[in-house]
Image: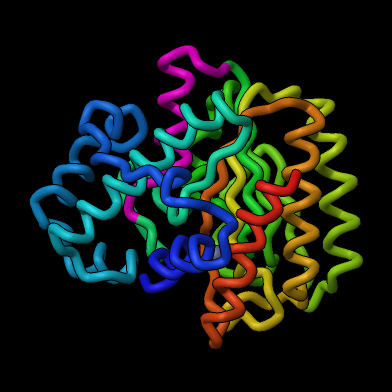
Amino acid sequence: MLKYELIPEQLLHEGTITNENLITPQTCTEEIILWTHEKGYLDKLLHQTLSASEQRKIGFPQSPGLTLRELIITQGTIDCCHWAFESGIALNVAGGTHHAFADRGEGFCLLNDQAVAANYLLRKKLAKKIIVVDLDVHQGNGTAKLFENEPGVFTFSMHGRHNYPFHKEKSDLDIPLADGINDAAYLSILSDTLSKLFGHVKPDFCFFQSGVDILETDKFGKLKVTIQGCKQRDEIVLSLIKKHSIPCVVCMGGGYSTDIRHILEAHCNTFRTALNL
Ligand SMILES: [Zn+2]
């Protein structure tokens, strides 16, 4: 997708980052993917044997290039974990593919990069209590299902009540929002919830899915959050991360505004906010 190329281009152009801040991941190994996804499903992705109906649910036609891209993005999220331990926060210019389940993909998601990375941290004993803060306008259904019986991962999803997926899974905490919610109401709910949650869950690692499909300009989202409100959302999450000294990996998630400049500006604001903490 074009936005994934434009984000680093814009950040480099404006001087928010330099080339030294960019890392280029390799592909994630099969062994690590299989800590989260089922072998039968991974084999279908690797050998291009998804059925027509499975591809329809994903929303992309299968291709070796698409599978390769997903494996690279997933490794990017794992690499970001190591950088987050070093410097507090690391951001993937893509990822946040939260609609991927153990045995299937849907909603433009093939592999669940944050789930793979969370299982990696648990397996490697690099974290004991992980929180996933999923603020994409769509519920993190794949992530919720993958960790429904995993006490080491707390899943929090705040999303549009009437948005896809229409059958929602059960996160550890779900906050479904009414259509048309504005900045003030959105930010107040988020701020109250997150500060309580961090005190209660006491996470030692955080994944933030910072989808910008909450914007009022989004084609699919039904909320009325402005670009400034979306930036304040990032400030609320990232300042709490900093206050509690919790390493955090941010992945971009969705964004479908008609004008790509709105998508780009909102995603770049997440990077700018992270840098200016
Ligand atoms: Zn979304």
Residue 38 position, x and y percent, is: 27, 36
Image quadrant containing the N terminus: bottom left
Residue 196 position, x and y percent, is: 87, 35
Q: Is residue 186 left or right of residue 70?
A: right
Residue shown at the point (56%, 80%) measured from the top left: 261
Question: Is residue 179 among the parts visible in the rendering?
Answer: no
Residue located farthest toward the bottom when viewing the structure as drawn: 258
Q: Is residue 276 highlighted in magenta?
A: no
Q: On screen, 249 above or below 203?
A: below
Residue shown at the point (61%, 59%) measured from the top left: 136
Ligand 1: quadrant of the figure: bottom right
Magenta residue span:
110-127
Residue 125 position, x and y percent, is: 48, 12
Q: Quadrant of residue 263?
A: bottom right
Residue 197 position, x and y percent, is: 80, 34
What coloring was used for the rendering? rainbow
Question: Is residue 5 among the parts visible in the rendering?
Answer: yes
Q: Is residue 126 highlighted in magenta?
A: yes
| 69 and 273: which is toward the camera | 273
